[in-house]
């Protein structure tokens, strides 16, 4: 008899993955589709929700056909997706236009008006800052890339859309609406609206003062439901189209980082994982709510009941590799990038790549900073250019590790690595060398999001206890730091940090 499985849908920026996952987190089958990002210079980034649904449906239909026995064993559906996006939907749940995604910073001016004052602390009115930190655990980013910024931008710049909107939904919650007909959000998914009182994990609710300051109509926000709970049943028309049973329970949707923590296997407190995808982050579970405003990090409600996680993000990681391939034409594909980069020495002959192609969130909240190469000379070749991209992202990861360890007041141990970037042996080894930590590429690293969504879903369905999730994910390969590269990378990392400090004012003038 086939073990029970959960259908996990993981909607990334590049497109969705669909997987059939058993209750031990093992991937029985998976499919992938692609979707387009619509860039609207200088600061806009959107995607078509209809394209999301088309891609998800195509992937799930192929998945079910490829593994019919496992598809018949389904006990539930769980969704994770790119986080801090906004889909405005009408009374019938239809999108009122493209989704504004996490890369979009058009709401920076609107956020500045809400959070600032005549007297400012790091750009925030002290009274408002204190209240935000006390009740939410964080504060809206100046970058304008949080969900609340998207909503305020729509209210200011597209009032017709704002007025017509019945609900403003995170991408994951929009997918759950399509699955169940119910528009709700979980305690953990709602955080980036920065409108919820998160002090008591058993009583999270929209805060009246924050609603008043932002001017957002509470009626346009989705009702809040507990993390890791069941939100509805799979609609018959969806089930029929996909070839699976109608009425399957659908659990709360979650952001990508929430699912990835669980799917990486690093579920214990202070057990770190590094995600290397289009963007990247370095996170772990934490016991309580805390905030580091200076470095734009906070402990926020996690997808697992009663827990918090450390929220931070690098805007560009794998995006830098795609930029080199698709925009600059330096390579045909990423396999060639790794092959050519491997021929350059550690340190790329002193060439430093700055990965801030879309601004930065952590450790600095700076949407105007930009990237590129520095210290480029006539002696550098294509191999140096390509290896330096991998190293530049790793310097950024080390910068983040340093502030994370300052936040946790503990030196973190081996780092589990997941995401598409983890496929590269060279990039994993560079991260180990630059960060000075063992890097553990976990089994099924490409599907950590789907696995995490499925395991949180299993908890929601009462089929798994939180304590049982520890130890489910094995290590495929460990990369240990090479002491021979330490001096080179220490020097270049120091220059990397100095370059940010030296150029941030120039970029603010160019891009402000």
Image (spheres, rainbow, N blue to C red):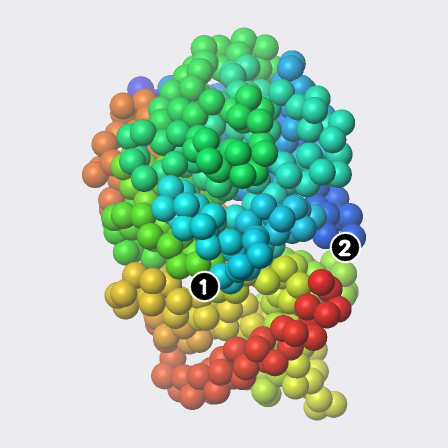
* Point 46% across, 70% down: residue: 399
Q: Which residue is mark 2?
A: 42
Q: Residues within 10 Å of mark 2 (few under 14, many from 20)?
A: few
Q: Residues within 10 Å of mark 1 (few under 14, many from 20)?
A: few
Residue 381 at what x, y percent from top left? 70, 82
Q: Quadrant of residue 415?
A: bottom left
Q: CA distance from mark 2 to mark 1?
A: 26 Å
Of marks 2 and 1, the one in the foreground? 1
User: In the visual, does 382 lie left or right of 231?
Assistant: right
Q: Secondary structure at mark 2?
A: loop
* Point 47% across, 27% down: residue: 185
Q: Quadrant of residue 219?
A: top right
Q: Quadrant of the C terminus?
A: bottom right
Q: Quadrant of the N terminus?
A: top left
Residue 328 at what x, y percent from top left? 76, 65
The relative height of residue 3 versus residue 439 in the rendered view (above or below) is above
Q: Is residue 307 visible?
A: yes
Q: Is residue 283 visible?
A: no
Residue 176 at what x, y percent from top left? 52, 24
Identify which residue, 240 or 310, lies in the foreground.
310
* Point 64% across, 15% down: residue: 91
Q: Which residue is mark 1?
A: 294
Identify which residue, 506 or 172, lies in the foreground.
506
Q: Secondary structure at mark 1?
A: loop
Residue 303 at what x, y percent from top left? 37, 37
Identify which residue, 274 or 443, lies in the foreground.
274
Numbered tag placed on residue 60 in the rendering: none
């Amino acid at each position: 008899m086939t073990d029970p499985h959960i259908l996990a849908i993981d909607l990334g920026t590049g497109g969705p993955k669909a997987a059939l996952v058993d209750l031990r987190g093992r991937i029985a089958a998976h499919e992938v589709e692609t979707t387009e990002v619509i860039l609207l210079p200088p600061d806009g980034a959107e995607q078509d929700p209809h394209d999301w649904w088309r891609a998800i449906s195509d992937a799930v239909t192929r998945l079910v056909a490829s593994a019919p026995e496992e598809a018949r064993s389904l006990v539930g559906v769980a969704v994770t997706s790119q986080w801090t996006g906004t889909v405005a939907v009408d009374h019938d749940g239809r999108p009122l236009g493209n989704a504004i995604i996490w890369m979009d910073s058009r709401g920076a001016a609107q956020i500045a008006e809400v959070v600032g004052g005549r007297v400012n602390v790091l750009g925030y009115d002290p009274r408002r800052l204190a209240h935000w930190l006390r009740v939410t655990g964080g504060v809206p980013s100046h970058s304008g890339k949080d969900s609340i910024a998207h909503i305020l931008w729509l209210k200011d710049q597209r009032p017709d859309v704002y007025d017509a909107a019945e609900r403003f939904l995170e991408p994951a919650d929009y997918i759950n609406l399509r699955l169940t007909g119910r528009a709700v959000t979980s305690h953990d998914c709602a955080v980036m609206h920065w409108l919820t009182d998160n002090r008591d994990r058993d009583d999270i609710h929209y805060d009246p003062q924050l609603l008043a300051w932002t001017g957002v109509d509470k009626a346009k926000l989705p009702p809040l439901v507990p993390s890791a709970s069941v939100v509805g049943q799979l609609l018959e028309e969806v089930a029929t189209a996909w070839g699976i049973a109608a009425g399957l329970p659908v659990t709360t949707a979650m952001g990508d980082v929430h699912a990835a923590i669980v799917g990486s296997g690093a579920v214990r407190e202070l057990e770190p994982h590094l995600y290397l995808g289009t963007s990247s982050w370095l996170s772990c579970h934490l016991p309580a709510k805390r905030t580091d405003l200076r470095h734009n990090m906070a402990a926020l409600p996690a997808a697992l009941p009663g827990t918090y996680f450390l929220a931070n993000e690098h805007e560009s990681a794998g995006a830098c590799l795609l930029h080199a391939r698709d925009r600059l034409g330096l390579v045909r594909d990423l396999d060639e990038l790794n092959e050519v980069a491997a021929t350059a020495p550690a340190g790329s002959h002193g060439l430093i790549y700055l990965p801030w192609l879309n601004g930065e969130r952590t450790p600095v909240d700076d949407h105007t900073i930009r990237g590129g190469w520095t210290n480029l000379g006539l002696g550098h070749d294509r191999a140096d250019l390509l290896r330096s991209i991998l190293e530049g992202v790793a310097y950024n990861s080390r910068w983040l590790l340093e502030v994370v360890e300052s936040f946790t007041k503990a030196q973190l141990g081996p780092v589990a690595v997941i995401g598409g970037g983890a496929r590269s042996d060279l990039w994993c080894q560079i991260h180990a060398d630059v960060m000075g930590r063992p890097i553990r590429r976990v089994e099924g690293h490409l599907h950590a999001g789907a696995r995490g969504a499925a395991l949180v879903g299993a908890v929601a369905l009462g089929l798994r206890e939180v304590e049982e999730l520890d130890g489910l994910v094995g290590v495929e390969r460990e990369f240990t730091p090479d002491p021979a590269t330490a001096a080179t990378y220490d020097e270049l990392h120091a220059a990397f940090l100095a370059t940010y400090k030296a150029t941030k004012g120039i970029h603010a003038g160019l891009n402000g």
